[in-house]
């Protein structure tokens, strides 16, 4: 095993398998073994803009960063910018190790920010905890790769740990895409609505359009299973467009019936923003229905703004100029930046439910939420707190200055017919 990869000095794949297998065979019972799989977002773009020499340097730097960790037992470069490594830590140190790994990735990307200023250096990291040291190393690598691919290009997630649920998503791909395509063709995709409530007025002030999919036996497929499948395949573009048109049609229907209409928000996935004609296509479709733009809100997740920011900002600015509202969804779930929020052409910030839950558990967290709501109010952005489940949570965030809320305290996502009966015909909750 004297031959090694010339660029990185790491083992070749077959040699890595042998060394890792030998190591796991003599594994210590008090140690926790983890396999980490990593690569770069948009590495082809880096090669094209900065040259292959610069791309090679980035790979070499990552390999060196892996090997510099004393927990690293062995590492290899299977191909291109893909680096994998087997690490060992004390079983009771994993919580500390997770934070260290997150900081390592953040520091690595920050240290290369100036050198690669025309793009965002970002690592996709997948982790597999080795639960059975007798499991084949190739199987462990496959699991780490599933985790890595599940967050590929997601700038708001520092890493992903493999779970059986990720395996379910992968196995569901071949089964769910035909189901989705049939539902799309037959207009059988289920549209649900979840209301947004004004605490002060005690009434609905808007709603978010969401989707559900039925399998062959009529069972509802959870969104956290079918949405990642559609995102990975690119089919989420068709889903978003379907929901958008459905909402346009429904608003037109409500207006024709003389109902009191509230703004409805629809999601725009990041893939939309790579289409040059996105704004023109949306406006052309919207104008078929002759409805006021104030009734439509487009939600974009926080992480989208960390990729191709200028391109995305230009498009959402044009949508706002037309009269649509723009909201940032899941704010606080990832690398939230108040500096970025200050320059974004958006109208509404939706505070992530996980961020809310975690922050309300202690005084420091509550101080952060209170300060954030104050700042957002001062720069005249509307705020929606997601995931409100108790009156105590409602009371706290309302007193902090947030009136608009969404969560199970008020209602879960419900089928469109139930939503109409409960909220459109009857405006008081």
Image (cartoon, helix red, strand yellow):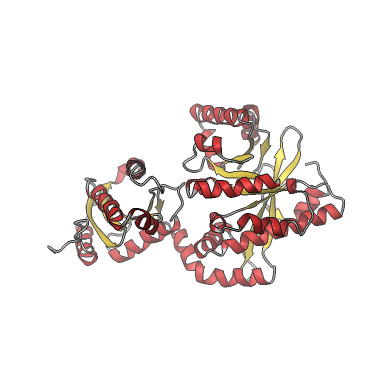
Q: Which quadrant of the structure image shows residue 134?
A: bottom left
Residue 356 visible in the shown view: no
Instruction: Report the number of numbered marks.
Output: 0
In this rendering, does residue 235 appear at all? yes
Residue at 31%, 61% in the rendered image: 80
- Toward the viewer: 144 or 32? 144
Viewport quadrant of the C terminus = top right
**From the image, which quarter does the N terminus lie in?**
bottom left
Q: Residue 262, position in %: x, y? A: 76, 46
Name, please, the residue furthest toward the left.
Answer: 2
Position of residue 38 measured from the top left corner of the image (x, y, whole percent): 34, 55
The correct choice, above or below, for 337 with respect to 170 in the image is above
**From the viewer's perspective, is 390 left or right of 131?**
right
Identify the residue at the far right of this view. 258
Between residue 254 and residue 165, name the one nearer to us.
254
Q: Could you tell whether 210 is left or right of 311 in the image? A: right
The location of residue 165, given as percent across then percent down, is 47, 59
Indicate whether 98 appears above or below 210: above
Of residues 189 and 44, which is closer to you in this image?
Answer: 44
Where is residue 398? Give x, y as percent: 65, 30
Is 142 above or below relative to 358? below
122 versus 240 height, above or below: above
Question: Taking 14 as reference, is 408 left or right?
Answer: right
Quadrant of res 22: bottom left
């Amino acid at each position: 095993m004297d031959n090694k990869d010339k660029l990185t000095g790491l083992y070749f794949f077959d040699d890595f398998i042998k060394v890792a297998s030998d190591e796991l065979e003599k594994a210590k019972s008090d140690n926790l073994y983890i396999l980490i799989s990593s690569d770069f977002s948009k590495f082809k773009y880096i090669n094209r803009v900065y040259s292959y020499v610069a791309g090679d340097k980035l790979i070499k730097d990552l390999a060196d960063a892996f090997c510099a960790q004393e927990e690293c037992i062995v590492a290899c470069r299977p191909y291109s910018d893909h680096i994998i490594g087997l690490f060992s830590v004390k079983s009771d140190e994993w919580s500390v190790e997770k934070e260290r790994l997150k900081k390592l990735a953040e520091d690595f990307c920050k240290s290369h920010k100036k050198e690669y200023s025309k793009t965002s250096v970002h690592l996709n990291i997948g982790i597999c905890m080795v639960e059975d040291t007798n499991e084949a190393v190739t199987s462990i690598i496959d699991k780490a790769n599933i985790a890595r691919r599940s967050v590929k290009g997601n700038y708001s997630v520092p890493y992903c740990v493999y779970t059986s649920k990720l395996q379910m998503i992968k196995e569901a791909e071949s089964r769910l895409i035909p189901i989705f395509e049939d539902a799309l063709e037959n207009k059988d995709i289920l549209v649900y609505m979840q209301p947004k409530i004004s605490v002060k007025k005690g009434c609905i002030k808007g709603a978010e359009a969401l989707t559900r999919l039925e399998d062959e036996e009529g069972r509802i497929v959870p969104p956290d299973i079918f949405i990642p499948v559609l995102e990975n395949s690119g089919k989420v573009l068709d889903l978003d467009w379907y929901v958008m048109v459905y909402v346009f049609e429904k608003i037109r229907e409500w207006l024709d019936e003389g109902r009191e209409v509230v703004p409805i928000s629809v999601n725009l996935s990041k893939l939309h923003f790579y289409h040059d004609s996105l704004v023109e296509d949306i406006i052309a479709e919207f104008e078929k229905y002759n409805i006021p733009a104030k009734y439509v809100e487009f939600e974009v997740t926080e992480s989208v703004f960390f990729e191709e920011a200028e391109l995305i900002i230009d498009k959402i600015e044009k949508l706002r100029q037309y009269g649509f509202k723009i909201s940032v969804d899941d704010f606080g779930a990832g690398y939230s930046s108040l500096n970025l929020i200050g320059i974004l052409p958006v109208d509404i910030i939706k505070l992530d439910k996980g961020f809310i839950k975690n922050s309300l558990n202690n005084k420091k967290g509550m101080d952060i939420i209170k300060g954030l709501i104050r700042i957002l109010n001062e720069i005249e952005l509307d705020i929606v707190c997601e995931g409100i489940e108790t009156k105590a949570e409602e009371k706290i965030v309302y007193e902090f200055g947030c009136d608009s809320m969404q969560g199970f305290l008020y209602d879960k996502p419900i089928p469109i017919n139930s939503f109409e009966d409960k909220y459109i015909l009857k405006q008081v909750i």
